Amino acid sequence: MTISPQSISLTRYLIEEQRAGRINADLRLLIEVVARACKTISIAVGKGALGGVLGDAGTGDDVSINVQGEAQKKLDVLSNEILLEANAWGGHLAGLASEEMDTSQPIPDVYPRGNYLLLFDPLDGSSNIDVNISVGTIFSVLRAPDGVTQATDDDFLQPGTSQVAAGYCTYGPSTMLVLTVGNGTHAFTLDREIGSFVLTTRGMRIPEETKEFAVNMSNQRFWEAPMQRYVGDLLAGKEGPRGKDFNMRWVASMVADVHRILTRGGIFSYPLDSKCAAKGGKLRLMYEANPMSLLVEQAGGAASTGRMRMLEVQPTGLHQRVPVFLGSKREVEAAVRYHAEHDAAA
Ligand SMILES: O=P(O)(O)OC[C@H]1O[C@](O)(COP(=O)(O)O)[C@@H](O)[C@@H]1O
Ligand SMILES: [Mg+2]
Ligand SMILES: [Mg+2]
């Protein structure tokens, strides 16, 4: 693709949002810096085996483990460094937090500070890195509490409704940035020759009804009863209570699964199961569930823990985990209904 004079770049889109009074200059620049960091990550991902970026972080048998208790890939570490380095000196932030770091990261004294907080999952879908399947970066932006110029972990503990921007970048056959600043969800595709993100879908809309679900079925026997019944009814197809046949997809990169759902509908779910119940779920509220939920709601979809609206969960910890149901509105409502019926009968 070549950029025509009519093409709307990310920069132009953000300037128009600023002129309309929906974002200020600091937030615009912050998003530009994140987008630039994503381009750098995209180049590293794209080099694959030629770039020496595949495989585990650490040396020999001494694989590096992050705060989540998960083995880190080289690209987890590299992407985290790229995002930290790009954002720390920008002057828009009072703090950064990452899935890969134990605590939030203060802005070094030598740099100016601003009033935003940036949270990210630098590389989502790590298990897919070495097999050349789509991975991504997810980010969320909050406002620092009044008067806070150097944030501590507690300052980040705001519900998803407080997000002023959220987005993800998917490193797949093409690199795409999907963004909301609270005025719809929009998709930008990276023109690799020119190095610019170009608006390719304005106002993504998730169809309300769907016949497609995404879940890791290998966990079925560990699920709670309402999830067992819900998926059992999906699998029963036309002859079952739902009266239609459902298809299933599972990439195991949340970014890729959510991108499919934003594009053609569906329900994505990582429910509570007995393996992850002690932690509260598998996916992370602040780095994964909240930003994706805002993007999905802004595209006309819904997002829930199964028992409450995701964006209203009051976080209690930076690395808190939650069960996740998001996507086509009617289908998320159906999954929530199964949980409500179960809880009412208990
Ligand atoms: O391997 P599983 O259990 O199916 O889990 C897949 C889920 O885990 C994740 O990979 C977690 O993300 P990270 O790679 O950032 O840890 C999600 O992207 C994905 O939905
Ligand atoms: Mg992730
Ligand atoms: Mg990750």
Image (cartoon, helix red, strand yellow):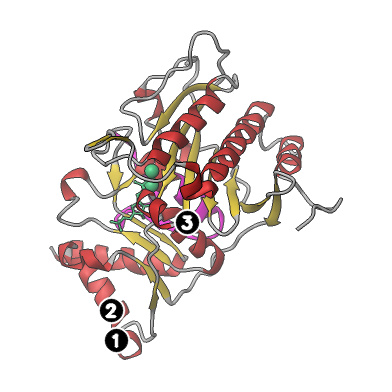
Q: Is residue 294 visible?
A: no
Which circle, 2 or 3, is nearer the viewer?
3
- The amino acid beneath tag 2 is Asp
Q: Nearer the viewer, residue 314 or 139?
A: 139
Cα distance between the residues tagged 2 and 1? 6 Å
Against 155, residue 137 (above or below) is: below
* Residue furthest out toward the left: 346
Give the secondary structure at mark 2.
helix
Q: Are marks 2 and 3 in contact (CB under 8 Å)?
A: no
Residue lying at 44% horizontally and 42% vertically, measured from the top left? 53
Which circle, 3 or 1, is nearer the viewer?
3
Residue designated by label 2: 233
Residue lying at 28% horizontally and 73% vertically, measured from the top left? 231
Give the secondary structure at mark 3.
loop
State the extent of the magenta-drawn residues as a range: 291-316
Q: Residues within 10 Å of mark 1 (few under 14, many from 20)?
A: few
255 is within the stretch colored magenta: no
Cα distance between the residues tagged 3 and 1? 34 Å
- The amino acid beneath tag 3 is Ser
Residue designated by label 3: 134
Give the secondary structure at mark 1.
loop
309 is within the stretch colored magenta: yes
* Quadrant of the rendering where the N terminus is positioned: bottom right
Q: Are marks 2 and 1 in contact (CB under 8 Å)?
A: yes
Residue lying at 29% horizontally and 53% vertically, measured from the top left? 323
Residue designated by label 1: 240
